[in-house]
Image (cartoon, rainbow, N blue to C red):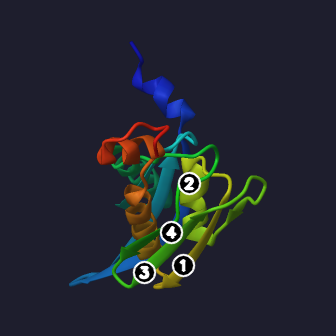
Amino acid sequence: MVSPETTEVELKDQVVAINRVTKVVKGGKNLSFSALVVVGDQTGKVGYGLGKAKEVPAAIRKGIEKAKKTMIEVPLAGVTIPHAVLGCFGSGRVVLKPAPEGTGVIAGGAVRAVMESAGIRDVVTKSIGSANPHNVIKATFEGLKQLRSPAQVAQTRGLSLEEL
């Protein structure tokens, strides 16, 4: 039986954005922090979460907990993605393209955090439209959810992997 502590050790978390937010109330302003965090095991599982709290460390911790709950499985072709894909969320669009070995992660801040956490080492990306890290990460995840491995495509078409 695997304990939760052993799975947590394997996960790598990365803080993408920390934002100071204020709420104006009758007595003045309430200050708090929001943290956008990406968590992944670097073998194809990745998730993101938003945590809010009065202090930064508490917000990061809450974001990590939420990210662990929203993890998705990403099909990999070696250390890259199987095919090109376009992810959209709001006005944010992210183009993900597979790259030959040795290319590295060609990506901006928010997309780079997701790719590194997922274990994708060779990929070319382009973020179009919104530069808001929340929308960019959500668009990246929409793109990753669209990815299909060759085995999944063959099964959908009713063919064997060799026929494909």
Badge 4 is on which residue?
A: 18
Looking at the rendered image, the disc whose residue lies closer to the viewer, 4 or 2, is 2
Residue receiving disc 2:
81
Specify the amino acid type for callout 2.
Ile
Measure how far apart labels 3 and 2 are at the Cα level: 20 Å
Q: Are marks 4 and 1 in contact (CB under 8 Å)?
A: no
Q: Which residue is mark 3?
A: 92
Q: Residue at x 50, y 24 (%)?
A: 6
Question: Which of the two residues, 149 or 86, is positioned nearer the viewer here?
Answer: 149
Q: Where is residue 64 shown, x and y percent of the image?
A: 43, 49
Give the amino acid type for the residue marked by disc 3 in the picture: Gly
Distance from Cα at disc 1 to Cα at disc 3: 7 Å
Q: Dot 1 surroundings within 10 Å: few (below 14), some, or many (20 or more)?
A: many
* Residue 127 vs residue 32, the one in the foreground: 127
Q: In the image, residue 48 lies at what x, y percent?
A: 42, 56
Question: Rounded to the nearest whole Å, what is the CA distance between mark 4 and mark 1?
Answer: 20 Å
Whether residues under marks 1 and 3 lie with C-beta atoms below 8 angstroms apart, the answer is yes
Name the residue located 41 percent from the left edge and 54 percent from the top edge: 63
SS state under label 2: loop
Give 162 or 66, whichever is nearer the viewer: 162
For the residue carrying disc 3, how many other residues have a C-alpha within 10 Å: few (<14), some (14-19), or many (20+)?
A: many
Q: Secondary structure at mark 4?
A: strand
Give amino acid for label 1: Ser
Question: Can you tell which of label 4 and label 1 is closer to the viewer?
Answer: 1
Image location (x, y in percent) of residue 155: 34, 41
Does the residue at mark 4 contact the one at mark 2 (Cβ under 8 Å)? Answer: no
Q: CA distance from mark 2 to mark 1?
A: 17 Å
The span from disc 4 to disc 2 (Cα, nearest Å) is: 29 Å
